[in-house]
Amino acid sequence: MTTPDLVLALGGGAALLAAFLPQVLSRRPLSLPLVYLLGGMALFVLPIGLPEPDPVAHRAALEHITELCVVVSLMGAGLAINRRAGVRAWSTTWRLLGLAMPLTVAGVAVAATLLLGWPVGAALLLGAVLAPTDPVLASDVHVGEPVDAENADDEVRFALTSEAGLNDGLAFPIVYAAIAVAAVGGTGWLGEWALTDVLYRTAAGIVSGLLIGWLLGRLFFRAPSGGLRLSERRDGFVALAATFLSYGVTELVHGYGFIAVFVTACAIRRAEHGHGYNNVLHGFVEQIERLFTAWLLLLLGGFVAVGGLSGLTWRGAAVALLLLLVIRPLTGWLAQLRGPAGPRERLVVSFFGIRGIGSLFYLAYALGQAGFGVPAEELWAVTAFTVVASVVLHGLTATPIMKRIDALRDRTENTSPATQPSR
């Protein structure tokens, strides 16, 4: 058996498993990402001639594959959110983005400086790479399919979904800052960075996403000709067309495509909130996302199995665990003080700061732009260990914790005065 044939066979098997494993695992304290991670480890220790997954040698390929996976997941996240955007309705989201995310970047950067002795550029890069939560691996704690009711999303799932949908794009300015520190040094780059990388590119992503989403929404649901009204044809692959169009156009005008894709999805959803075509689009994107997730996690498991974490020291592992167990929970909790979430919900939102495919993309991208004074193998080891630890920690706890909080919420609603029969 040749290597391409073997890869195709294993890829097909992984895709088939992705079809029925979610139902098998739905009531068990195991997530699909965790199963694929363990499966990748098992596959790559077998003497069957699989090529070693090397993110240093195949950096460019990994960058584009993870990029594609993230943009597809962002479209799915935006289509799934039922709550209309607003200052008060999305209060928890703005708090997590405006407070928890920058505090997380700072906390990780300080930990990398003190524990690992890394230069400022590398420490800031690690903070930027590990700050965004992941829309790909967090399906167990995200909102489900689109529904008619705008108040259907509970605060935990809504906050984690909307946060992951936006912070993947908002990490880019910090990544660019880390690249500037490593490549240029000093502070002469700050003015251009603030105007271009922070203000213009963020605004371009939002405006582009709103405009494309509005235009596509009109085309899908309100085109004067029935032949152009795609919502009547039920083609799910149109979601990929919207994803690539939004991302490509925004990147061509040097905006943040990640932000644009999520905003486009939200705008399409708002065009006809309760239309069944939203479910068709979301269902197709979710299937594609599941395929990419399966394949990438098999490779990540293989990376671990073939010694990819050999560059990891106990100090690097300590930084990762500090992020998952201290920095994210603490910053997430502080950001939500006096917010709409209750005490239990704040704890859950703070704890499930899942790291994943987005972190792998950002690291691959940054290493293609500059050198950071730290061996690439060490940067990959710390980042990969963080993702693996997150997949294990959150994969084992997501199902029981979410079941518990759902049960408590239902009990509270059923015993509240508004639900009691009048006498």
Image (cartoon, helix red, strand yellow):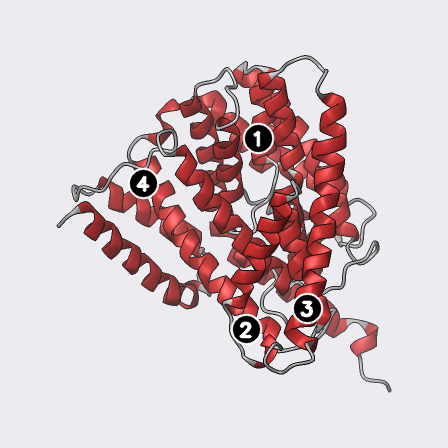
Residue type, numbered disc 2: Val
Q: Quadrant of residue 333?
A: top right
Q: Which mark is residue 217?
A: 3
User: Could you classify mark 2 by the number of other residues whose Cα lies within 10 Å: few (under 14), some (14-19), or many (20 or more)?
Assistant: many
Separation of marks 1 and 2 at Cα, in angstroms:
40 Å
Residue type, numbered disc 4: Gly
Q: Give the mark nearest the N terminus, 1 or 4.
A: 4
**In-image side of 39 versus 410 (left or right):** left
Residue 95 can be seen, yes or no: yes
Q: Which mark is residue 322?
A: 1
Separation of marks 1 and 3 at Cα, in angstroms:
43 Å
Q: Which residue is mark 2?
A: 280
Q: Image point 52% across, 19% down: which residue?
A: 372
Separation of marks 2 and 4 at Cα, in angstroms:
34 Å
**In-image side of 154 versus 77 (left or right):** right
Mark 1 vs mark 4, foreground winner is: 4
Q: Image point 42% across, 68% down: which residue?
A: 23
Q: Give the mark nearest the N terminus, 3 or 4.
A: 3
